[in-house]
Image (cartoon, coloured by chain):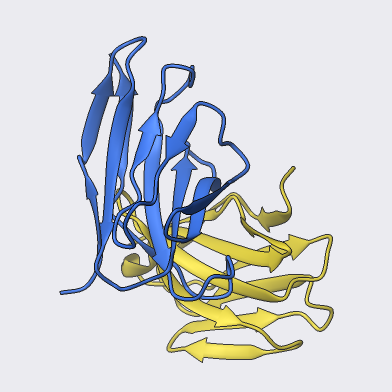
Amino acid sequence: GQQVMQIPQYQHVQEGEDFTTYCNSSTTLSNIQWYKQRPGGHPVFLIQLVKSGEVKKQKRLTFQFGEAKKNSSLHITATQTTDVGTYFCAGRSGKFYFGSGTKLNVKP
Amino acid sequence: DGGITQSPKYLFRKEGQNVTLSCEQNLNHDAMYWYRQDPGQGLRLIYYSQIVNDFQKGDIAEGYSVSREKKESFPLTVTSAQKNPTAFYLCASSSGTGQGSQPQHFGDGTRLSIL
């Protein structure tokens, strides 16, 4: 069954609004990776988090890894139309699983 | 320019036919992976290989076969036993041999449909 759950499945926002996607696991993860897939494209690696409570930033994107290493989030501040795509988390707990993704649509 | 090349971009399969999807990488990565992506779903692992001449089944290996005779190449055959092959197939590679320990680099994918 699905080892890494991701919510929400879809998110529609107005340009300039913030966006957050959440990733949850029932087991402790050794790491969490985030990928972005543009429409019609392939997943592109964004970042990897390894430490408990880790927070990393890439411009308007903020990535967090929970203290218990069972959840993670990706927050985008002031979305732009270039942020459109599906964001996947992927976590390793013995095996490596991708979440089902959150599809972000940004209305100009 | 280093990367992963998948071919063809689009592929059509007739009933009862085996088809092979090509994946080549020049990143000198040890590990290679095949994923299947269905609309609105995440990536499901079909097969992975951590070293030449060795590969492991993923979560949905039934109806698929692979080979890893060269470090650069990891072709996937979709056999006639796979009754629902229509999907987007993605090949990926990573350095290191622990699945998920390093970032994965993806090819552009192959869209397979049934005629």
Residue at the outermost left position: B1
Residue at point 47%, 66% (across, down): A35
Q: Quadrant of the N terminus of chain B?
A: bottom left
Residue at point 41%, 23% (across, down): B79
Residue A106 is situated, as x and y percent measured from the top left of the image, at 40, 60
Question: What is the total number of numbered labels drawn onto the structure image?
Answer: 0
Residue at point 40%, 58% (across, down): B92
Residue at the outermost top position: B15
Q: Is residue B92 above or below residue B115?
A: below
Depth order, front residue of B23/B90:
B23
The shade of chain B is blue
Residue B18 is situated, as x and y percent measured from the top left of the image, at 33, 21
Q: Quadrant of the C terminus of chain B?
A: top left
Q: Place residue A43 in its image quadrant.
A: bottom left
Residue B87 is situated, as x and y percent measured from the top left of the image, at 41, 33
Q: Is residue A97 above or below residue B104?
A: above
Residue A106 visible in rendering: no
Depth order, front residue of B78/B30:
B30
Horizontal side, residue B57 vs residue B103: left or right:
right
Residue at point 57%, 76% (across, down): A75
The shade of chain A is yellow
